Amino acid sequence: MLSRGFLFLYCNKQGYRIKYFQSRPAMKYILGIDWGGTYIKSGLVDDKGKIVSKEVFASTGLKKRDIFVGKLHSLVSALGGKIKAVGIGAPGIINSKDGFIYYLPNVPGWENYPLKKVLRQKLKLPVFIDNDANIFALAEARLGAAKDVERAIFLTLGTGLGGAVILNGKILEGETSASELGHVPIDLKGKRCNCGGRGCIETFVGNKYLLDRYNKLKKQKTRIKEVSHIFKKALTGEREALMVWREFSKALGMFLSGMINVFNPQIIIFGGGVSGAFKVFKPLVTQQIHEQAMWPQVKGLKLVKAKLKDAGIVGAAILAKENL
Amino acid sequence: MLSRGFLFLYCNKQGYRIKYFQSRPAMKYILGIDWGGTYIKSGLVDDKGKIVSKEVFASTGLKKRDIFVGKLHSLVSALGGKIKAVGIGAPGIINSKDGFIYYLPNVPGWENYPLKKVLRQKLKLPVFIDNDANIFALAEARLGAAKDVERAIFLTLGTGLGGAVILNGKILEGETSASELGHVPIDLKGKRCNCGGRGCIETFVGNKYLLDRYNKLKKQKTRIKEVSHIFKKALTGEREALMVWREFSKALGMFLSGMINVFNPQIIIFGGGVSGAFKVFKPLVTQQIHEQAMWPQVKGLKLVKAKLKDAGIVGAAILAKENL
């Protein structure tokens, strides 16, 4: 069978000539990049948001700007013209219009870096960049748990607390990528946070803080290093594990009540590793919200787990698609 | 001189007749109602947002629903067809699309009341209702300190803390009037708030709380009853007064840092009685924000006092005009 192209028929008095011109391969895919603290995931995404191929790299080797840019270049080159755009979810504060990185809290050396400009020149392709939590939320809003919802709050519970807000179906953005929900303070005399502030909700619910609290309560010699352990122990009814999730839920419920009073969301979606314990903390967080938030703001509110696999890749592709 | 109207000329074989038809009075005004805890202000507003006449009533006599509705009816009747619509800023949680009042924290008896529906039937005029803080913000966004600004946070500092958010030039609303910024908790173990929650920012910066704190510090027999007194004393350098404003600014700065991290506003506008002390608390709040908020979110941020007089009346009229 002929590959995609067109037939050319030329006719004159001497006779005729026929020639088949083969088209360039259809540029129908978007390369979606989910840039996380541990892994960088790259996926080829079709127009319907389906991942047709995927690669995963350890982030450690790609921390430096030049190496990161070089890696993207080799990825794009290897795909030989199949790509029409690149979308990237980056872990930090960004000007998403300009694709300018102000800083990445957990990746030093990226301060004030015009990533979009650099990549456009290097890749010769349209490039779109936003904050990773915004990207996750975009994927859930278009294809996942917040589909057809006007107002949603999205949390990624992991090392930190990533947050995003969907309003009228769009991501809340400022001149920056905005909606840094993890850095809303809930305690005037709270612990110092990575961001430089004090008492941010992240210092109550981040991975590290949960493990610290649990290990302190357990007073064991060998430190527990996985939050999933605290989750499993809670399911067996262990006192210390339950206490960790109670404190976690109280803080998260207080914080969310503030956000509910501000946004009146229809749904709150929990993603990220720590949301593995959703079953344990959902009833506790719900109770705290009903005690704290104003009742007309809570009416009809749903708390759910994120639905999509690879939301980071898919969301990055959606970002590019919607802005092409 | 003839009053506004038109001339009618009728001609046939028998001759002609001429007649002058006087128009009905032009319905060019909107009645704007600023419904406050102490006073209800009513103003006739022209198309440019200028108040052409104004009346003020004590709220105490108008707390009951029937009396309030009757009063509006007599106001409208007295204006004899000059009005094309009525706009109302109400002190509570509302569904602004339906003009349905969920509740008014400081005016009991209004729970679940379809005010818009009742008034439309009674007044035979289009009626538009929103939360009072949203109304103030709308006025400032169109004609005041937030003119041509994309993202603004508006606070009314008084008995409580009213709040509103302007995004892309529009008021942030939910299914409710939303943006109840006064009820964002900033202290896990804070005081019980009027709203039923705990540690809301309102319990740190509301009028009553400032006076309680000052009177406690002063240990005087005669209680001070005016916040302006604490402001004046601070200007003379009085230790207790300065301490009240320092604590106020610390709490307000922490709360605002959270909102700045969420919204990345270009401007924060302070209205309401307590903002009389803006000169005293502005530098302290600014310092707290710079210590707490993430730097890219603060870039270019301005803190200013509200500009408009009678923003409540003008904003209510703008609400009606923009939704007519």
Image (spheres, coloured by chain):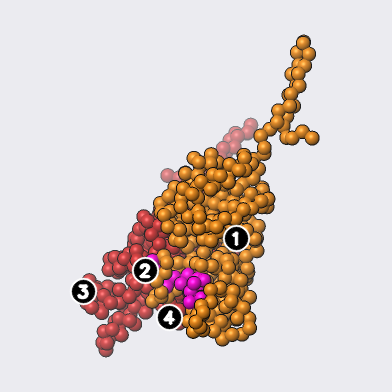
Chain colours: A orange, B red
Labels 4, 1: one chain: no
Quadrant where the image shows the N terminus of chain A: top right
Query: Badge 4 is on which residue?
Result: B190
Q: Distance between the residues labelled 2 and 4?
A: 16 Å
Residues at badges 1 and 3 in contact (C-beta under 8 Å)?
A: no
Q: Name the residue under label 2.
A: B253
Tag 1 and tag 2 share a subunit: no
For disc 4, the neighbor class at 10 Å (few under 14, some 14 to 19, many from 20) is: some
Determine crowd level at label 2: few under 14, some 14-19, many 20+ residues with C-alpha closer than 10 A: many
Q: Outermost residue toward the left?
A: B236
Q: What residue type is labelled 3?
A: Gly
Residue at image point 23% right, 78% down: B239
Instruction: Tell me which chain the residue with mark 3 is part of.
Output: B
The amino acid type of the residue labelled 4 equals Gly
Query: Where is mark 1, residue-wise?
Result: A150
Question: Which residue is at the front of the view, B216 or B100?
Answer: B216
Question: Pointer 3: what residue?
Answer: B237
Name the mark nearer the viewer: 2 or 3.
2
Q: Which of marks 4 and 3 is nearer the N terminus?
A: 4
> x and y percent of residue A143 in the render?
65, 57
Could you tell me the amino acid type at mark 1?
Glu
Distance from Cα at disc 1 to Cα at disc 3: 50 Å
